[in-house]
Image: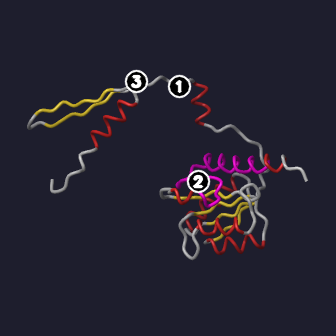
């Protein structure tokens, strides 16, 4: 091979396996190749724990939440709109962050699903603008949609949660419900 790795792969694997209480090894024969192996003992989860992880606990919310979907990709717009409508939500679509800000100025929404990478104005800048308009995370939850990796710079822009594309319907439902439940609980606790 013309290019090799840094030589850290096996060292990293060894540390990970040993940190989990396991063993790692290799068997090698010149001219035939090498076999790398590891063993880690895991306890079987209880049926109750498995069921909790498979299906998030149901949270009752108003099924007619008005969601602003901010997404530049037409296929993703159709797919996400369809999922949201099947969950009982009313959906308005904006193709970029600038369009989203106009929609928010002219309409009332219960939640924003915001793609991070878009032309004209990306989701990060749009979320900052939404927060600078006076909408708190409780008043207007923003769920960020990304196909990429979240960085530390993303942590302080005012989103309620980060969702990774492609989304499964139950994960979307759970994230929306959690955001709306948090908004309701906080609003109930405020006295005029």
Disc 3 packing (10 Å; few <14; some 14–19; many ≥20): few
Q: Earlier in the sequence, mark 3 or mark 2?
A: 3
Identify whether 52 is placed above or below 132. above
Residue 77 appears at what percent x and percent y? 60, 65
User: Left or right of 128: which side holds 2?
Assistant: left
Disc 2 packing (10 Å; few <14; some 14–19; many ≥20): some
Residue 85 occupies which quadrant of the picture? bottom right
Point out the frontmost of discs 1 and 2: 2
Tag 2 residue:
162
Identify whether 143 is placed above or below 23. below
Q: Residue at x 75, y 63 (%)?
A: 135
Q: Secondary structure at mark 1?
A: loop
Point out the frontmost of discs 1 and 3: 3
The Cα–Cα distance between marks 3 and 2, rounded to whole angstroms, is 32 Å
185 or 91, nearer to the observer = 185
Q: Secondary structure at mark 2?
A: strand
Tag 1 residue:
45
Tag 3 residue:
41
Magenta segment boundaries in residue numbering: 156-184
Q: Residue at x 74, y 50 (%)?
A: 180
User: Left or right of 30: which side holds 116?
Assistant: right
Marks 1 and 2 close (CB-CB < 8 Å) = no
User: Left or right of 101: which side holds 77?
Assistant: left
111 or 151, nearer to the observer = 151
Residue 171 is one of the magenta-drawn residues: yes
Residue 145 appears at what percent x and percent y? 57, 58
């Amino acid at each position: 091979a013309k290019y090799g790795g840094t030589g850290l792969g096996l060292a990293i694997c060894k540390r990970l396996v040993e940190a989990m209480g396991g063993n790692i090894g290799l068997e090698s024969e010149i001219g035939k190749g090498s076999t790398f192996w590891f063993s880690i003992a895991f306890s079987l989860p209880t049926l109750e724990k498995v069921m909790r992880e498979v299906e998030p606990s149901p949270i009752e919310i108003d099924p007619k939440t008005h969601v602003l979907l901010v997404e530049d990709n037409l296929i993703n717009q159709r797919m996400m709109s369809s999922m949201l409508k099947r969950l009982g939500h009313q959906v308005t679509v904006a193709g970029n962050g600038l369009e989203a800000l106009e929609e928010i100025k002219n309409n009332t929404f219960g939640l924003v699903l915001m793609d991070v990478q878009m032309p004209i104005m990306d989701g990060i800048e749009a979320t900052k603008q939404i927060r600078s308009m006076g909408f708190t995370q409780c008043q207007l939850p923003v769920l960020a949609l990304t196909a990429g990796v979240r960085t530390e710079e993303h942590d302080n822009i005012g989103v309620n949660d980060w969702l990774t594309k492609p989304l499964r319907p139950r994960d979307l439902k759970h994230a929306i419900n959690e955001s709306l439940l948090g908004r309701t609980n906080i609003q109930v606790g405020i006295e005029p």
